[in-house]
Image (cartoon, rainbow, N blue to C red):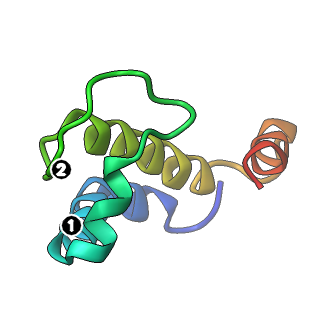
Amino acid sequence: MVSGAKYIKALIPAVVNIVYRKLLQYDITARAFQARSTSYDGPLDEYPDENSPQVKHRKMFLRGYLNKLCSDPSKMEFWEYLDKVG
């Protein structure tokens, strides 16, 4: 496992919240969350905030991505995941 990954993993929830708080702070970036992403088919809030279903969905994916980046790069599933999302 990557040295320090457990410390970084502990920070992921806070980092994700900070990223989305910042993105939603500005009208131009917040408007991007009004459009439906291809992987989300739930309800859309007209004026998204941190508790909007579409934002929660995207936060979940960012947490998953960051957690995977902290996983063991010596395993093939790590590289398969990066190939899939990249």
Q: Quadrant of the N terminus?
A: bottom right
| Disc 1 and disc 2 in contact, CB within 8 angstroms | yes
Quick one: SS at disc 1?
helix
Q: Residue at x 30, y 62 (%)?
A: 31
Label 2 Cα crowd, 10 Å radius (few <14 / some 14-19 / many 20+): some
Q: Quadrant of the C terminus?
A: bottom right
Question: Does residue 13 sit above or below 46 in this rendering?
Answer: below
Identify residue for label 1: 24
Q: Residue at x 26, y 64 (%)?
A: 30
Give the percent coordinates (x, y) of residue 54: 30, 38
Give the percent coordinates (x, y) of residue 47: 14, 51
Give the percent coordinates (x, y) of residue 64: 49, 42
Give the total number of marks visible in the rendering.
Answer: 2
Q: Earlier in the sequence, mark 1 or mark 2?
A: 1
Q: Is residue 19 left or right of residue 81?
A: left
Q: Please tell me which residue lies in front, 6 or 70.
A: 70
Q: Residue at x 18, y 67 (%)?
A: 21
User: Marks 1 and 2, how far apart in space?
Assistant: 8 Å
